[in-house]
Image: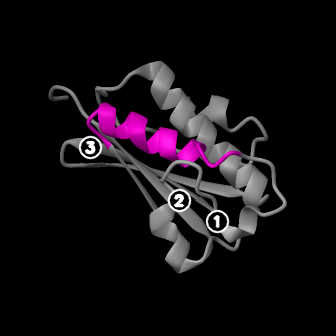
Amino acid sequence: MLESADYLHQAVIPEIPDCLLCADPLRLQQVFDNIFANSYKYAGTKIEVKICREGRRLNVHIQDYGKGVREEELPLLKEKFRRGSNAEHIEGAGLGLYISDYFMREMGGELKIRNGEEGFEVTAGISLSGDI
């Protein structure tokens, strides 16, 4: 899914730990597609992907090296039709993160966004099923 979402080949996808995910594959693919598309559109930089198991979640951490968004805009980005001020001249409807957040919550996971030290960061926390 990550390799498919990274259609511009800006990321190195690390090895994924053995686990069984509790997720809708189509919806999870849409989440990853949106995250990568946003990085391509707003940052245009390489993308760093880190994956780790934490408790009952597989966390997929995706970071670009763009400028990020204003801190005061972060809480609004997962709302319907909300976009950061950095998107003023870039095509979009402000639905991608809203839909991705909804899909992750419906699958029992979560979507976290933040400005990191070197760019914009998104973490998709995917629920695990069963014991491996």
Classify residue 46 as left or right of residue 14: right
Q: Secondary structure at mark 1?
A: loop
Gap between marks 3 and 2 measured at Cα: 23 Å
At horizontal 26% and vertical 43% (from top left) the residue drawn is 57
Residue type, numbered disc 3: Arg
Q: Residue furthest left?
A: 131
Numbered tag placed on residue 57 in the rendering: 3
Q: Quadrant of residue 108?
A: top left
Which residue has dot 2 on it? 77
At horizontal 50% and vertical 20% (from top left) the residue drawn is 26
Q: What's drawn in magenta, residue-wise?
A: 93-109
Mark 1 and mark 2 in contact? Answer it, CB < 8 Å: yes
Residue 117 visible in the picture = no
Residue type, numbered disc 2: Leu
Task: Identify the mark nearer the N-term, 1 or 3.
Answer: 3
At horizontal 65% and vertical 29% (from top left) the residue drawn is 4
Residue type, numbered disc 1: Gly
Location of residue 50 in the rendering, given as x and y in whole percent from the top left corner: 48, 53
